[in-house]
Image (spheres, rainbow, N blue to C red):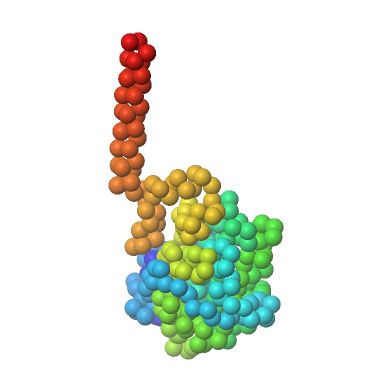
Amino acid sequence: MKSLSIGALALARAISTVTRRLKPALRKATLLAFFFLHPLQAAPPQTDFTQNLGQQLPDLTFTNSTGTQVSLLSLTEKRPALLVLGYYRCPMLCGVVMKSLVRSLQDIRMSVGTDFDVIFVSIDPRESPSLAAEKKKSYVTYYGRRSSAAGFHLLTGNPDAIQQLADTTGFGFVPTDDGKEFAHPSGVLVLTPGGTISRYFLGIEYPPTDLRLALVEASDGTIGSPADHLLLLCCNYDPLTGRYGLAINRLIKAGCGLTFGALALFVIRSLHRERRKS
């Protein structure tokens, strides 16, 4: 899904206000209808995602939800991470992205804070750690797993650090005419331990299976079940769609290998029987 243009952002905010009193299912359907059908949904190029796969994040300093300055790379030292850029006062899009992400993570056996981390960086330098703390509490509560709070990192920063991170990740954003809001793309980045960009998931829907495979792949096999590692052998990541699909070539090679192995085993057993008879 493409990002919102500045002109559509005001209308999106109005729709969000009207739909707050609707039932959750109806509210989500209304928001999705706006995103996919609104004629102004195509955003200017400067608010799109540029996928910088394999790019190393710079060692930038941000402020966490307790008001403590932290190194961004220090948050990715031990395990892979999911990175989201947005802002806490976003009238609609950022909240949709985070709720959709956390909802998908609920369906993954691996846990935030144990197997991977979730990092949200505000692109608005005017936002405060107290606002980040408020949002963190709501996401941790929504996620619903004990001891996950240590894995949610909601950060704020200065303009230079924000812009440098946006440039590195290919996150294009521009302020609206009144300067109160931002037009920006929606998506989630997967980081390897050490802070290298491994995968992009664009849009507002993140299938749990794809997220799980991306985290297992980013961890270089240090997390995930044997079934996950086997499934990765049969799947390829498509950067254009941000999805994992069956790798036909790998399946054909695997099938040929199994067929050859079975044939070789049959010949060996046949020869062994003939020798025993003789």
Residue 42 in the figure: left or right of residue 95: left
Quadrant position of residue 7: bottom left
Most foreground residue, 192 or 241: 192
Residue at 43% across, 50% down:
232
Residue 200 lies, with reference to residue 64, above or below; the image says above
Residue at the bottom extreme, as displayed: 178
Quadrant position of residue 56: bottom left
User: From the image, which quarter does the N terminus lie in?
Assistant: bottom left
Quadrant position of residue 255: top left
Residue 241 lies, with reference to residue 45, above or below; the image says above
Residue 267 lies, with reference to residue 146, above or below; the image says above
Residue 18: x %, y % from top left: 53, 71
Tell me if I can see residue 18 in this picture. Answer: no
How many callouts does the rendering have? 0
Residue 120 lies, with reference to residue 240, above or below; the image says below
User: From the image, which quarter does the C terminus lie in?
Assistant: top left
Most foreground residue, 178 or 133: 133
Most foreground residue, 97 or 20: 97
Residue at 52% across, 87% down:
159
Residue 30: x %, y % from top left: 47, 63
Residue at 34% across, 49% down:
247
Residue at 47% across, 84% down:
163
Tell me if I can see residue 132 in this picture. Answer: yes
Residue 227: x %, y % from top left: 49, 44
Residue 273: x %, y % from top left: 36, 15
